Amino acid sequence: MEEKNNLKTAILGATGLVGQRFLQLLDGHPWFDVTTVTGSDRTVGGLYGDTVQWRLESPPNRKIANLTIHATVPDNVDADIVFSALPTAQSLKIEEEFAEAGYPVVSNSAAHRMESDVPLMNPEVNFSHLSIIDEQRRKRKWDGAIVTNPNCTTAVLTLSLKPIAENFGLKSVVMSSMQAASGAGYPGVASLDIIDNIIPFIFEEEEKVQRETRKILGRVNQSSNVKVSASCHRVPVIDGHTEAVFVETVKAATPEEIASSMTEFKAEPQTLKLPTAPEQPVVVRSEQDRPQPRFDRSEGKGMSVVVGRIRSDSVFDGVKYAAIGHNTVRGAAGCAVLIAESMKSQGYI
């Protein structure tokens, strides 16, 4: 999978935080070449480098900086693959227009995630769900497609759960999250609200985690019957969502067996050596005080989930552990890029 394919790539909503992360991750990508960026009416017509308020560590390369920002309409885009970083309110209609016009759209938005004919993908967890694209195209009579990545918290949770589900089965999952400020976008949470504070509410987050987890862990067109309960909190961390996870398994498992299943876990993206797939999807730490977002969020270039403190639980008939994942990489743009690579590997692009 080393060949250079030069697929023309468009980023919808490229000026926002997730749009910027898309551009950063696609810089030098062996398959996808960003040729089009779109933005709001206020930014249309400007050069990307002159217009965007760049918020990531390294600035965009010269080629991206010199791209003209276009309006977000299909007629303005010439691309083989489209990544959507649009706000949910805008994405519902616009993404459908692009798919109807023949574009494969990989969306970071929540707008289409729970539609029965739209794959909700975390590629190592439910690679086979891409086959739902065939049903979508038949049902909607379009040549394009819409595929979505999960909510950032769900992405971290489901990747950590997959080895457990495969080896021991799942009855119930309780998850309490400590979510980074960047998950709220830019400018996000006001500084006087989040500094020296924890906010125990994120709008619709718990509901998203609960329903999306069941869809991802289920079969094609059939959600899992695992019980999922989530409690979500915003904390004063820049990047990296931390999750305390309590799992009741079908088959009894020791913490050592759970850790071994996570360490040994590989899936189709690793077998196919997809460019964005981390070599180790789930990394297990043995230290008593790990994982920590400052030290572990960039594991696998931000695409791995790091797990630690795996231990038996006296209430649930199972185990509990801590997990960390990078919310704008594995939880957003990086997952979407891996989805697009998975689509290409199966002939959907």
Image: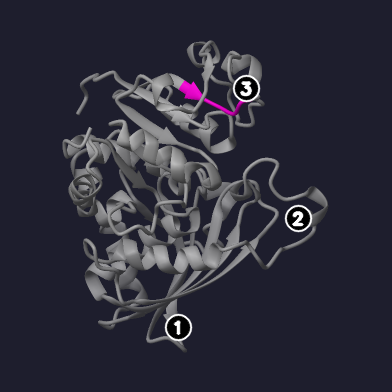
185 with respect to 346 (left or right): right
Kind of element beneath mark 1: strand
Q: What kind of element bears circle 2?
A: helix
What residue is disc 2 on?
194
The answer to whether mark 2 and mark 1 are in CB contact below 8 A is: no
Q: Position of residue 1 (x, y in %)?
A: 19, 29
Number of numbered tags placed on the structure image:
3
For the residues marked 3 and 1, what is the alpha-carbon distance in whole angstroms? 52 Å
Label 1, residues with CA under 10 Å away: few <14, some 14-19, many ≥20: some
Q: Is residue 135 left or right of residue 214?
A: left
Quarter of the figure with residue 53:
top right
Q: Camera-side residue: 246 or 37?
A: 37
How dense is the environment of label 3, judged by Cα within 10 Å: few (below 14), some, or many (20 and up)?
A: some
Q: Is mark 3 on a helix, strand or loop?
A: loop
Q: Which amino acid type is shown beneath numbered disc 3?
A: Thr
* Of the pair 258 and 174, the residue shown nearer to us: 174
Please identify the dominant SS of the magenta region. loop
Q: Mark 1 points at which residue?
A: 313
Sequence order check: which comes first, mark 2 or mark 1? 2
**Mark 3 highlights which residue?**
43
Q: Is residue 5 above or below residue 281?
A: above
- Image location (x, y in percent) of residue 349: 23, 32
Please report the bounds of the magenta region as a residue range. 37-41
Amino acid marked by disc 2: Ile
